[in-house]
Image (tube, rainbow, N blue to C red):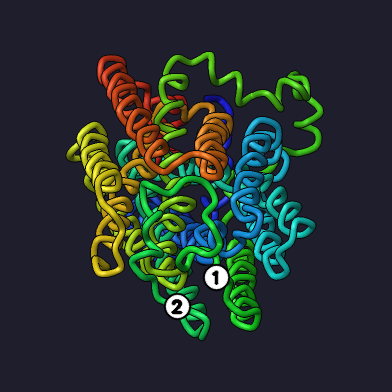
Amino acid sequence: MSHFTELKRTTKDMHREQLEDSAFNLDNGDKGSPLGHHLLTRQYEIGHMKNVVVVSFGFLLLFTATGSLLNLQSSLNADEGMGLVSSSVTFSSIVLSSMFITPTAIRYLGCKWTIFAGMACNVVYSLGNLYPSWATLMPSSVIVGLGESPLWAATSTYLTISGGLHAVEENKKSQDVINQYFGILYLLYQSSAVWGNLLSSLVLGQDSTTVNSTGDDVLFCGMDSCGVPDVSLGNSTTRPNDRLLYTLLGCYVGVGVLAMLLVAVFLDNICKKEKPEAMSQQTETFCSTLLATFRRLRDKRQVLLIPVTSYIGLELGFLNADYTKDYVTCAIGIHFVGYVMICFGVTGSLFSYVFGRLSQYSGRVTLFILATVTQLSCILVLLLWKPNPDQLPVFFAISGLWGMADAVWQTQTNALYGVLFHSQKEAAFANYRLWESVGYVIAFACSSFLCVDVKLFMLLVVLLLSVTLCCIVEYEEYKNPTPGIEDTNSVVPEDTVL
């Protein structure tokens, strides 16, 4: 609490002189007049919103590349299961990063430069896919995994701090502002699926080796698929020619570098790294800093949120590894993966923003139940439906509904973490990334040897457990509300709150 208060004062002091001078000049020298006060408030609001848009647009560019590559791994690098192993290595590295790197990285680099470094790791991953082999893909997968948890935890911490400051300045509830900020982030982040997958489909669709599936080809598609498919069946493992792949990956590297430049130049550093003299005064041991994520497990609320956090990784892992390979690629071809995932990106992006705004009226529980019903329906359809190239709209409908449900899990779970654990943001969001990555690892690891129907039943069980425990946490929060950021900082002098 004291750290946030000090950060809040530092951030306001950083801009106060310039803004107050502007207010003075525009209001004939009276800084305390209504016009001067309104100008200060308005400029603070614009500054916060600018930062939200910059980091969100950076994510749009970055995950246009990384997200699309992840969708294609199980189909593009199917030889010896290299793509699935690569994905498992990536998320295993995220687990290690969440435990040992994230809190320290944010402390030493600050949020802005941690975000920048995490983006650089994603660019390395795109470069590793230029010449995919065990020697290039595995190291680049480790690197992107090590950078992913700090990237997301720093971004979530940044938005929570900025949303808290904005709420104090405008006398709003911090959870409402934070919900809106995460809605904007996931609006642009989810839309990256549109542009990345559109790019991959347009490029790979030019491949003259693309073939159409027949009735025999789709015999073992869908829930009857078990493990890595036979290369002779359907479209499952046909690799596009190198010229098209180099074009696609060159574009991915370019947009990743552009995202890094955007953050480096335009993002304000509102949570700065600690000064060397401050670090030397730390009483915590290095080991206790590294294990800060595990110390969060002393909080019962954090333990109850583990299933829903892991479920996010499970459901996205299933979509990226199994739905794209065993339903889409197997039945209608790899060139359709991008188009189907565009539908996921569009609905996820749109509903991320809608739910971010709607949650202040409906509450999170209502949205969690909506997501549960939607995804439960999709799972039942996948269990009963046999993929058929003649039923093209069904492939898009399932990914679209999946995206709508995922928008709830992503925005509302992040916002819930920000509200419940705002006094220990870095460790809490590292925990979020840790358990989400555990879900991803399980999904990708199981993809190699479990049948699709078994994986769907696993999803079903974890989904029902997750929403039940989420409702328990929300009920406890309703009975005993966590003090908001605006409440915990009431010690700040009133004249610093705009």
- Above or below, 313 relative to 24: above
Q: Quadrant of the C terminus?
A: top left
| SS category of the residue bearing label 2 | loop
Asked whether the viewer can see residue 215, the reply is: yes
In front here: 294 or 90?
A: 90
Query: Is tag 2's residue or tag 1's residue first in the polypeptide sequence?
Result: 2
Q: In the picture provided, is 429 more to the left or to the right than 171?
A: right
At 68% from the left edge and 45% from the top edge, which residue is drawn? Answer: 146
Tag 2: Cα neighbours inside 10 Å, few (<14), some, or many (≥20)? some
CA gap between label 2 and label 1 equals 9 Å
The location of residue 235, given as percent across then percent down, is 47, 68
Residue 175: give x, y in percent of width and height.
Answer: 34, 36
The residue to which callout 2 is attached is: 211
Measuring from the top left, give residue 199's x and y in whole percent: 48, 75
- Considering depth in this image, is 373 or 241 the residue closer to the camera? 241
* Residue at disc 1, secondary structure: loop
User: What residue do we see at 39% from left, 44% from top?
Assistant: 410
Give, as a three-letter code, the residue at label 2.
Val
Say whether marks 2 and 1 touch (CB < 8 Å).
yes
Residue drawn at x 49%, y 51% is 321
Q: Nearer the viewer, residue 418 or 23?
A: 418
Circle 1 Cα neighbour tier, 10 Å, few/some/many (<14 / 14–19 / ≥20): many
Is residue 334 placed above or below 115 in the rendered structure? Answer: below
Mark 1, residue position: 238
